[in-house]
Amino acid sequence: MAKSGEHPDKALTAVTVRNIKRPGRHADGNGLYLRVSPSGGKSWVLRCMVQGKRRDIALGSAKLVPLTEAREAATALRKLAREGGDPVAERRRANVMRPTFAEAAYKVYTDRKATWKNPKHQAQWISTLKAYAMPYIGERRIDLIQTSDVLRVLSPIWLTKPETAKRVRQRIGTVMDWARASGYFEGENPVNGVARGLPAQTIKPKHHEAMPFNEVAQFVGSIPEMNVDPVVKEALAFTILTAARTGETLGAKWGEIDLEAALWIIPADRMKAGREHRVPLSTSALAVLERSQTLSDESGYVFPGRKRGKPLSNMAMAMGLRRAGLSVTVHGFRSSFSDWAAESTQFPREVVEASLAHAIENRVEAAYRRGDLLEKRR
């Protein structure tokens, strides 16, 4: 601490900054102050002479800018002022040129959300960053973000919410890749090295719980006895019989159905892979559609919901399974289909994968595969 009458020099410590509560300015030395507001907020301020005038220059929140970085910034700005420059204008220009992480994240989200077909994914992409990343690095300038900052974001949730943490890591990486490509910083993406500072995740990924395939036929036969809305019964049966995803069933419209050709044609904009998918309809699936015609309304949806003009709720079939005392998921019936095909039939894997509308992972094979194996799948 400085003696009375002397200017302080590095009077503050990280512990002091963390614990100090008294409102006002607290000098660190050489014009750097920690300002504490009556509400408890803490921020850094540099007071120095700029071109003959005393100026106060904000250096950011103490929550986001540690003491050492505040000192480094203050030293650089004082040097600029001594050389006749304008630190205020320089910082304003730098801040305009380089966005904060939050600004960059919203820019990436806005530019890319139209390419994401799943509204739930659209919402989750930005909401996870708002919940887990922005409290730590949201106001931090994009070019100042280091691997240590990413580590601070991920450490609290890495073991307790492993799947969420992985998504957050991937989404931070996407934002940083965009910033680097846009010329806001050079060098390696700070996300790349963060794995070295994180413990191994021992929690195994949780898969959709599925019904054993040899029990599915009996279950489908029992669906008419379920204590749920008739539309829910038919939607669930149709989903199982076509090995469809929940969203594909819920969004189905009569205009997609060709009863005469026994074909359901799902347009590309409703498919996960972004490609039109043709589904051959079995006799049982056609029977479901015949019954569903008596339940339809003017909305055009095959399985209309209770709200006028809306499809069935995305939780309706799942709740029906719960009411039946089952722990399986609707999506799990796709696994049941896959298991049945693998263990009880001789159909090649590519026919099964086409039935599930899975994208071909091999790019060369995908480039040459023009058909969708419809007749083999039928």
Image (cartoon, rainbow, N blue to C red):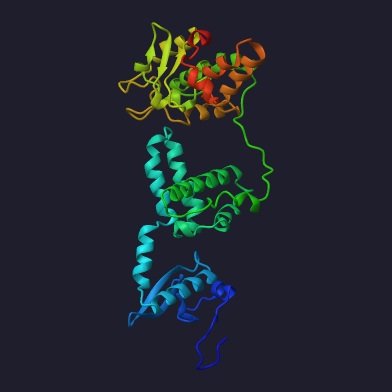
Q: Quadrant of residue 274?
A: top left
Query: For the view shown, which residue lies furthest in the front direction?
Result: 83
Locate residue 327: give its quadrant: top right
**Residue 172, image x and y in percent?**
50, 48
Quarter of the image with the N terminus is bottom right
From this view, report whether residue 193 is shown above or below residue 240.
Answer: below
The answer to whether 79 is drawn above or below residue 183 in the figure is: below
Residue farthest toward the left in the current orientation of the protein: 298
Figure label count = 0
| Residue 331, image x, y percentages | 54, 26
Residue 366 in sight here: yes
x then y, percent, for residue 112: 40, 40
Q: Is residue 223 above or below residue 320?
A: above
42 vs 96, left or right, is right
Q: Nearer the viewer, residue 85 or 18?
A: 85
| Viewer-proximal residue among 309 and 210 | 210
Q: Which residue occupies 40% across, 6% down?
A: 261
Q: Is residue 82 left or right of residue 18?
A: left
The image quarter containing residue 163 is top right
Residue nearest the observer in this picture, 310 or 254: 254
Q: Position of residue 81 (x, y in %)?
A: 39, 77
Task: Determine if residue 38 is in view.
Answer: no
